Structure formats: C-alpha cells, structure tokens
Image (cartoon, grey):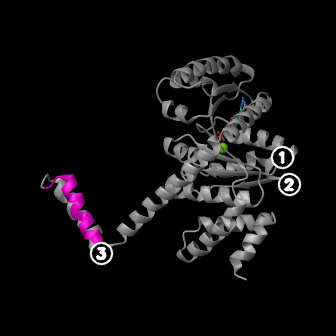
Amino acid sequence: MAPSNDLANSILSGNRSALARGITLVESRRREDFHPAERLLSGLLPHCGNSLRIGITGAPGVGKSTLIEVLGMQLCEAGKQLAVLAVDPSSSVTGGSILGDKTRMDELSRHANAFIRPSPGGDTLGGVAGRTQEAVLLCEAAGHDVVLIETIGTGQSEVAVHNMVDFFLVMLSPAAGDELQGIKRGVMELADAVLVHKADGDLLAAANRTAQQCMLAMRILHSGDESPPNVLTGSSVKKTGIEELWQCIEREVTERRNSGALADRRSSQSVAWLDRTLQGALLADFLATPNAAKELAAARERVASGAQVATAAARAVLRQYREG
Ligand SMILES: Nc1nc2c(ncn2[C@@H]2O[C@H](COP(=O)(O)OP(=O)(O)OP(=O)(O)O)[C@@H](O)[C@H]2O)c(=O)[nH]1
Ligand SMILES: [Mg+2]
C-alpha cells in the first residue's frame, strides 16, 4: 500500500501525529511532496466538510488567543473535538506570536480533545492561506467538530480567512469605538458577528460604548439586510459573554445550514479556491518561462519610458509566453 494510504487511514482513525504529519505534507513546498499531498487530500475529501469552520480576527493584542483558550476549553469539556489553526504571515516579523499563543493556550493544548497547529510563518500570505485551507480539510477528516482559525487584523489575511470559514468573528478592543468610522469598514463588512472584547473591570464602560457605536455602524452598513450581524460584548478573563457568543454562532450557522446558504457559501469558496490556485500556478509557470520573463522586463521598460501603452505591452508579453 502506498505510504499516503497508510497516512490517510491513520488520519481517519484520529491519530494526532498522523494529522500533524499530513499537515506538514500539504504545507511542504518540495516538489516531490506535491503529488503525495494531492493524493492524500483527494483520498480524504469524502470524509471532509463535517466541521463548523470559524474564523477569528482582530488587531494584535485584542485577545484572540485568550478567547480561543476559554471558548476552546468549554467546547472540549462539552465533548467536542477542536482544532485550532493560525494564519499569521507576519509571525516571523512579530517575533513568533505563535510561540506566545502556544503558551497562552496552555490549558487547551493539554486537553485530549484539542489539536493546536501553529502557523507556517514567514511565507507569502497566499501560500499560507492556501495551505491553511488544506489543513482544515485534514482536521475534518480526523474527526474534528469545530475548527477555529486565528488571524491577525491585516486586511489581506482577513479576506483570505473569510473565504474559508462558515462564520467570521471580528474582535474589537474596548477603545475601538473612536476608530470605527474609517479603518475597520472593510473588515466590518465581512463580519458575521462582532465581539467587543475585554469588557471587564475599568474597560467595561468603554466596551459597552464601543458596542453601541458598533451596532449603529452595522445597522448603516447592512441597511438593506433583514437583520445586521450581532454585536456582543465579552471577557475571556471574567468568562462573561462567551456562552452567548457560542449560542450566537450556533444559531446563525444552523439557520444557514437549514436555508441552504451554508452549502452555497462553501461551494463558492471552493470555486474561488480553485481560481486562486490556478492564478498562482499560472503565475509560477509564467515566471518559469525564460522568454516570457525576459519580454516582461523589456515591456516594463517600454511602458516606464512611455514608448508603449500598457495594454499593448501586456499582449506582447503574453504572445511570448504562449510561444514558450
Ligand atoms: N482585561 C482583559 N484582558 C484580556 C482579555 N483577554 C486577553 N487579555 C489580555 O490581552 C493581551 C493579549 O491577549 P492575546 O490573547 O495574546 O491577544 P491576541 O489577539 O491573540 O494577540 P496576537 O496573537 O499577538 O495578535 C494579554 O495580555 C491578555 O492577558 C480579557 O478578556 N480582558
Ligand atoms: Mg494570538
């Protein structure tokens, strides 16, 4: 039997180290791993799709990891199998926040029902996000009921994660109300719910104010919709609002599952994934075609100097690419 069959069977049987090895395989950039990774994924595909996929985003320090630890423990205690993944392309820059996450998720990482996977940091976002999507599938094949994906609040990674989850939670700090007007708009549009976090102690009043402002903002943003996404407050330290948050997520997802909206969302996510993969593959192929790359360099010069219009230059580059 091919090794990837053994690996697939071990993953299906819920073997943790097999799952970790499988994720390493699909994350690998080595050419010789591409086919085994693809075979593994294709073989497991019929066993995927059974988890609740949740993305959690928010500015650095808003408390994403702490929330995941608290919520995760509650889910595990309730008998759910939980996987935690991270999309954090900047983790190598910020000094390995994942290492911090590991320690912050101390209790959770020791729970028998939890599987925590640090992100493959220091890579381009597209690559990391693509492989996170594959990691989600492997976690599902391994029998995880809930997959939580943590990502930092950069526009790009948020869009990438939004594209692979059933529910997208945006976390705000208690002081975020002042900034709501401008910067967060793009992200707020993606939110299925907003949690104003750290609603405890001295920060409680500010958190409530921010939640009020956020509700107003969401009503304006979703003025055409029947009901705007929920805005909640909560504290992972005081363990308040966490139960309500989970109920909100379950209620929303159940509604969407019943209406067929969830299946539609997943289908269009898969198609978008195909498109992105194809774009990446085409670009890689293009860059590996020496004549095309040479023509591109020349075309850039012609366009920069004003000697040729960009559209004509692009056509010339494509012609060269097709000819190989
Ligand atoms: N007051 C208060 N502080 C909290 C709460 N949750 C987390 N914190 C604190 O906020 C800080 C950041 O928490 P993290 O969970 O690491 O935040 P994060 O969003 O995962 O941060 P990055 O992964 O670096 O982006 C820590 O010092 C926590 O102790 C909360 O509910 N209330
Ligand atoms: Mg974190």
Side (left or right) of 276 relative to 165: left
Q: From the image, which quarter does the N terminus lie in?
A: bottom right
Q: Picture quarter containing residue 138?
A: bottom right
Give the extent of the magenta segment. 308-322
Q: Point out the tag, 1 or 2, that comes first from the N-terminus.
A: 1
* Residue occupied by mark 3: 324
Tell me the distance, in whole angstroms, between the alpha carbons under discs 1 and 2: 8 Å
Residue shown at 20% from the left, 58% from the top: 313
Side (left or right) of 189 relative to 73: left
State whether the magenta stretch is mostly helix, strand or loop.
helix
Tell me the distance, in whole angstroms, between the alpha carbons under discs 3 and 1: 54 Å
Residue shown at 85% from the left, 54% from the top: 112
Residue shown at 74% from the left, 24% from the top: 200
Q: Point out the tag, 3 or 1, that comes first from the N-terminus.
A: 1
Q: Regarding mark 2 in the picture, which secondary structure is present there?
A: loop
The kind of residue on which mark 3 rests is Gly
Farthest left residue in view: 307
Q: Nearer the viewer, mark 3 or mark 2?
A: 3
Q: From the image, which quarter does the C terminus lie in?
A: bottom left
> Few, some or many C-alpha atoms within 10 Å of disc 2 (few <14, some 14-19, many ≥20)?
few
313 drawn magenta: yes
The disc placed on residue 112 is 2
296 drawn magenta: no
Q: Nearer the viewer, mark 3 or mark 1?
A: 3
Q: Point out the tag, 3 or 2, that comes first from the N-terminus.
A: 2
* Residue occupied by mark 1: 76
